[in-house]
Image (cartoon, helix red, strand yellow):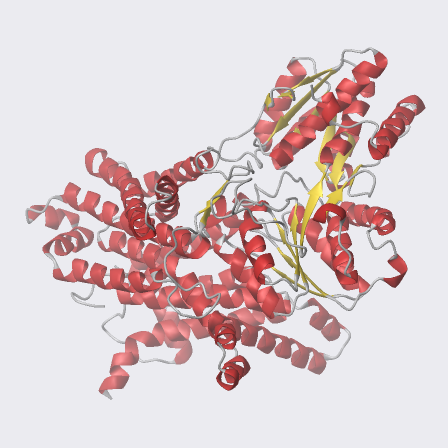
Amino acid sequence: MQVSKRLVALGATTAIIISACSGSSATTAPSAAASAAPTAAATAAASAAASAAASTAPSGAAASQNTNWVACVAFDTGGLGDKGFNDLAKKGLDEATAMGMTTHYSEAKGSTDYAANIQRLLDQGCQSIIAVGFNQQQAVQTAALANPKVDFGLVDSTWDPSGPDGKVGTADDIAQPANFTGLDFQIDQAAMLAGYLVGGWSKTGIMGTFGGQQFPGVTRFMDGYYAGIKYWDQEKGASVKLLGWDAVNQTGTFVNGDNPWGDAAKGESLASGFVDQGADVVGPVAGSTGNGSIKFMQSKGLWAIGVDTDQAISLPQYASAILTSAQKVIDAAVLDTFKANANGTAFAGGNYEGTLANGGVTISPFHDFDSQISADLKAGIDALKAKLIDGSVTVKDYLK
Amino acid sequence: MSSLARLRPLAIPALAVLSAFIVGSVFLIFTDIPALQVLFAGRPVDFLTTAFGNVVHAYVALLTGAFGDPPRFAEAIQQGTPQAWATAVRPLSETLVAATPLIFTGLAIAVSFRSGVFNIGGDGQFVLGALGATATALLLRGFPAPITLLASLVAGIVFGAAWGFIPGFLKARTGAHEVITTIMLNYVALQIVQLALRTDFMRPPKGSEPISQVIDFVRVPALLPLPGLRLHWGFVVALIVAAMVSYFLFRTTKGFELRSAGLNLTAARYAGMSAGGSIILAMVVSGALAGLGGAFQVLGTVTQMSNDIDAGYGWTAIALSLLGGNRPSGVIIAAILFGALNNGGHEMQIETAIPLDLLVFIQALVIMFVAAPDLVRQIYRLRPKSAEPGAPASEGAAA
């Protein structure tokens, strides 16, 4: 009896540790269309984007930035160390600390922590609270309505106006209050540039893409690739094709299953399938699953497009296969939002919109490929970027 | 003397907690990089005072985060406003909020362990209970709230029980080992949740993220009449259910059969009890308890179904059921302890930026010390006692 009891105890101890570990890895999925993003990438992105963003911040006056401010971040169950949105938001928070703001942060183990953590941050005297992940939407919105004097933000999401009836456009809709900022990214703009690059780069004229699961945050990348390739085809009279995503009908290839974001072997086999169909570039939008695809492409001497962060830096072992990455500059977005909150300025439309124009999204440097990409192609990318910035080209126009 | 003797069974768990905190503080001191830099700079005294001060600061934050801050209570007494009282009482309220799902899953595990069945599927039963409750609430939207609420709670029980029935049935009929089937069914349950959260029926019309509509139109009433406190009647129900489980296990024939099967299946069978029936019953009751926990979680605490509704409650329950000696009363105490640790841990992180993982570390240490009573006795020089406190099957009536 004694022995078996101890065995159970050992098992229980192991179980609690395993549950803690698996809890943090398994639940990263929602917030992690993101792939690996070590500090090097984040630093580079932050400094690049911070300077770009400072000039476009609504205050317009970086010189008179108020730093007497308590800035806080509520992470989701992905938690710190997810090498994705949570880590990038932490990077933005650290920049705020470096500027002289007082900062606090909280992590969550389950959805029960969301509202409680925001309340704890409020009790701590936070003046801006930015939450990471769409799972926190309800908690943030409730807190924003109850605490009109505190600023709230939500990474990669916008205000949901549907009131108690859950329907938009009805009498009980709740309008977005002035103290709420959605941190939204028009990543399709950056992905369109990447798609255009593939149009000019691909030797076989075929690119493959797939997502972890069919979320809007995922398909926006795929829309961008589609639009970029289509733009290339129209401009050059070419017939480059995208496999794995039909932007017109919004159908395509997704990993799904119980491990859509962490199954590197599945990523390899999907990439292999695309290569069999003639593709020589893949653009996986599936976290660590995508890393398997990049690895496969590298082994074949072929190429890939990274997502969310500059993956040539975050995955240096695969840098020789990564042409570029469609990046969300989360850290810059978080810092910009804190800065705007501290100065008491509001964003147009109430939301921070990461665009090519304000440096909230970007394609990362070409690194090893810089010398191999022709000047013509680079000029074409710059021209498309300029048109996307001035609005004469939109991604939507190329999804038909 | 007699009252002291009655406290004796608590000595080992209490000392286990104390030991875990001491080991945890050693861990804290030697991961405190700024303090260690002071040590390597050749100022050991400064290092000790800094590191020790940081540990005290962390543990004070943990305690105030779990049970409340005395100055805030003083403020509340002075001002007497509901808002001030809510702020003062909130940490305590949140500790009980955190404990509530753990009581349900802990009871679920205790019932199964008492019956000799190892239900590792608490997670799956919990999330399906939550899913069933959410679906029922959405289906009955527009009906009077009390009816919807009751139906949703029943749905949680039914879904959890059904998910417990499957491995019970498989074990009774085919001998399939429940440890394997329940673990596997956890994954199936999570996939069902994923799938369900993708349907238009569950999803908010605007978003297509995998998260359900908010169901706060049917909500378990708050327990305290103070603004913004989340503690709800689910906690009281958890206590009542614990008493019912205790009665069922130790005062009814069925409960006796379950415990007999748990002690010695062959003997129980020889005595004419239905072994298969006991296994199925144990798993159904166990699943129903976990499912009810899930239902209260979504109807009382978070009001929205999502992938991360479950914070590993089914797993933690295994540890705390053991800590509580597989007795309902023990489960309640252990659940409140774990709730306090989890809740206080968040406050500690916000104030001192110490990772939440430290709390997992401390919880694991508590279990290890409880599992090694001889070690604790030797460390604290306690006299050995013949009757092992909290042994799963050593006492007939408890709780």
Instruction: State the residue at coordinates (33%, 45%).
Output: B143
Instruction: State the residue at coordinates (63%, 38%).
Output: A33
Instruction: State the residue at coordinates (34%, 51%).
Output: B145
Which image quadrant is residue A385 in?
A: top right
Q: Is residue A392 above or below residue A140?
A: above
Where's residue A39, x and y in %? 75, 50
Q: Is residue A398 above or below residue A8?
A: above
Where's residue A165, x and y in %? 47, 44
| Residue that lies at the very extreme toward the right in this rendered image | A375
Which image quadrant is residue A285 in?
A: top right
Asked whether residue B25 is in view, the answer is yes
Q: Is residue B98 left or right of residue A40?
A: left
Q: Is residue B22 left or right of residue B10?
A: right
Q: Nearer the viewer, residue A386 or A112?
A: A386
Where's residue B87, x and y in %? 52, 73
Q: Is residue B338 left or right of residue A26?
A: left
| Residue that lies at the very extreme toward the front in this rendered image | A171
> Dividing the image into 4 quarters, which one contains the N terminus of chain B?
bottom left
Q: Nearer the viewer, residue B381 or A225?
A: A225
> Dividing the image into 4 quarters, which one contains the C terminus of chain B?
bottom left
| Residue that lies at the very extreme toward the bottom in this rendered image | B1
Q: Is residue B150 left or right of residue B272?
A: right
Asked whether residue A298 is in view, the answer is no
Where's residue A248, x and y in %? 64, 19
Figure label count:
0
Which image quadrant is residue B92 in?
A: bottom left
